[in-house]
Structures are given as structure tokens and as C-alpha cells.
Amino acid sequence: MSPATLSAKKHSRILVAGADPAQRAAVLHDLSQSLPEGAQLGEASAVSEVLERASTSSVVMLAGDLGEVSAESLMHMLGSRHPNLPVVALGLPAPTASRQVTLGW
């Protein structure tokens, strides 16, 4: 393995965010069982923590809303601030037909 690959793996971090400690714990447990040993997992329970840690994360997983900010709103906020950061909102309902954009070709 090259030094660059080792460095990238060393700094990979998954940030799990959500206001509900039980939801965060469940996601963290599932990830720790699924990912290789040594994977760096972090958690945040407030929007300010997510915004602070997002730039040093490889991916942000939203395990529900964070207080007064919905997971969907935070997902859009992170996408705006960090366009190359993968953000996964767990448990969001699929878009309904009324919310989908129809493209006329």
C-alpha cells in the first residue's frame, strides 16, 4: 500500500449526526460491525458540531433531525458548504410525485 493510501485511510472519518442518542448509537453500532477495524467514527448531536466537523469528515450520515433543524435542511446546508462531501440522510422518505421535477424533453 502506498503512503498516500495509508494517509487517506488514516484520515477517513464518518460523522454520524442526530439529536436522538439512541438513533446515533444504533447507527454507530451497525457501522462498527460492518466496517474494517480502525475505521474512525465520530458523532455529533448539534448543528454547530456538524458544521464544525464536516470539513474533516469523509462522509456525514444524518440519523434524524438535529433539534430545530431537519435532516433534510442540514443535508442541503452541507451540500452548499461542502459540495464534494457525501451526505447520507438515513430514514428520509422518498420524494413524492408532487415534489419531483418533471423534465420536458
Image (cartoon, helix red, strand yellow):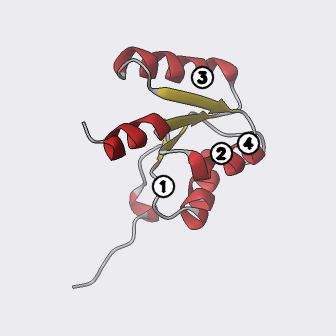
Q: Which residue is pictured at 50% across the width and 37% down the height? A: 13
Q: Which mark is residue 53?
A: 2
**Marks 3/1: CA–CA distance:** 22 Å
Q: Are marks 2 and 1 in contact (CB under 8 Å)?
A: no
- Disc 4, SS: helix
Disc 2 marks a residue whose amino acid type is: Arg
In primary-sequence order, the first of circles 3 and 4 is: 3
Disc 4 marks a residue whose amino acid type is: Glu
Closer to viewer: mark 3 or mark 1: 1
Q: Which mark is residue 49?
A: 4
Disc 3 marks a residue whose amino acid type is: Gln
Image coordinates of residue 14 in percent, x first then y, are 50, 36
Q: Nearer the viewer, residue 70 or 29?
A: 29
Disc 1 marks a residue whose amino acid type is: Leu
Q: Which mark is residue 85?
A: 1
Q: Which residue is pictured at 54% across the width and 44% down the height? A: 57
Closer to viewer: mark 2 or mark 3: 2
**Marks 2/3: CA–CA distance:** 19 Å
- Rendered position, 27 above or below 46: above
Closer to viewer: mark 3 or mark 4: 4
- Disc 2, SS: helix
Q: Quadrant of the image for the N terminus?
A: top left
Q: Which mark is residue 23?
A: 3
In primary-sequence order, the first of circles 3 and 1 is: 3
